[in-house]
Image: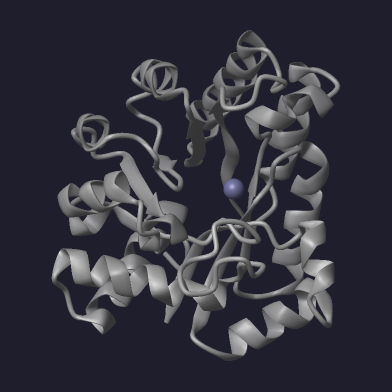
């Protein structure tokens, strides 16, 4: 039994797979995959993530705005109002993905990204939902902002920071680290070091599909069926039995997202 804590099955790229995302999800749930959280990147696809969650028993939704997409939103007030309404739906389990991304020069201005990030953290504090955090080339600012929200449960998804930064986050019991296919890459020195220090009860498995396909399937569209490679690698690093690793990862995710409790 596996839990993919971060996927984007509403992404158009899944149309390239025969039968599309829905056929793929049927096949995945017939196999080893039990739970999937689809993380939205705009208020528009928050609705798509919710539609999948309402169609498939094992699907849940995170609703929110990704830092690279905040330019597509009408206004921060309007976004928060829409997200607040969506959080009332039973299959919505988190806010996100939100955060900061300074990687590309044409990304939305940093101040605007921060405005959306902070608004979503405020909403999390008000409602008690966990937050799915995306950080790329912005670790200092992400860390500084999150330190103002020690009470909010945060998932640092596909974490790309240093082991030192990870250690600082993990001092707060409300922080979890998501491991994606990046962990299987030959040049993945930092994620492996982070995996070594993460306590077993604070690690999560994810795909970020259709992106970040693990070895040996790089070049293909990623999906939850490939996540076993990441889980195997995590088991190897943590020196745990594979079945035990799967059980721990599923337990952790169910606790974070408050599923079946
Ligand atoms: Zn993502």
The number of numbered badges drawn on the structure is 0
Residue under the point 47% across and 26% down: 137
Tell me if residue 190 comes above or below residue 59 in the rendering.
above
Q: Nearer the viewer, residue 173 or 134?
A: 134
| Residue 165 drawn at (x, y percent) | 26, 30
| Residue 138 visible, this angle | yes
Q: Nearer the viewer, residue 259 or 30?
A: 30
Q: Residue furthest bottom?
A: 30
Apparent side of residue 158 relative to residue 211 in the rendered image (left or right): left
| Residue 114 drawn at (x, y percent) | 58, 15
- Tell me where residue 57 sits by quadrant: bottom right
- Tell me where residue 77 sits by quadrant: top right
Q: Nearer the viewer, residue 126 or 95?
A: 95
| Residue 258 visible, this angle | no
Apparent side of residue 95 relative to residue 135 in the rendered image (left or right): right
Residue under the point 48% across and 66% down: 214
| Residue 145 drawn at (x, y percent) | 43, 17
Tell me if residue 9 comes above or below residue 189 in the rendering.
below
Tell me if residue 173 comes above or below residue 103 in the rendering.
below
Residue under the point 43% across and 55% down: 182
In what quadrant of the picture does the N terminus appear? bottom left
Tell me if residue 148 comes above or below residue 249 in the rendering.
above
């Amino acid at each position: 039994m596996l839990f993919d804590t971060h996927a984007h099955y509403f992404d158009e790229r899944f149309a390239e797979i025969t039968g599309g995302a829905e056929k793929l999800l049927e096949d995945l749930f017939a196999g080893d995959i039990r739970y999937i959280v689809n993380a939205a990147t705009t208020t528009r696809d928050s609705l798509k993530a919710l539609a999948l969650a309402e169609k498939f028993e094992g699907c849940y939704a995170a609703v929110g705005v990704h830092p690279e997409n905040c330019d597509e939103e009408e206004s921060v007030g309007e976004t928060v109002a829409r997200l607040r309404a969506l959080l009332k739906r039973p299959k919505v389990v988190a806010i996100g993905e939100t955060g900061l991304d300074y990687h590309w020069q044409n990304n939305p201005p940093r101040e605007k990204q921060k405005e959306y990030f902070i608004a979503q953290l405020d909403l999390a504090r008000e409602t008690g939902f966990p937050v799915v955090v995306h950080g790329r080339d912005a670790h200092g600012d992400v860390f500084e902002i999150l330190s103002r929200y020690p009470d909010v449960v945060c998932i640092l998804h596909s974490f790309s920071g240093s082991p030192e930064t990870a250690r600082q986050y993990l001092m707060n019991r409300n922080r979890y680290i998501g491991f994606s296919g990046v962990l299987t890459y030959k040049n993945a020195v930092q994620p492996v070091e982070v995996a070594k220090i993460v306590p077993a009860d604070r690690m999560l498995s994810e795909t970020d599909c259709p992106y970040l396909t693990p070895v040996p399937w790089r070049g293909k569209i990623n999906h939850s069926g490939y996540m076993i490679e990441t889980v195997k690698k995590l088991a190897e690093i943590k020196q745990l039995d594979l079945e035990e690793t799967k059980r721990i990862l599923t337990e952790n995710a169910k606790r974070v997202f408050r599923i079946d409790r």
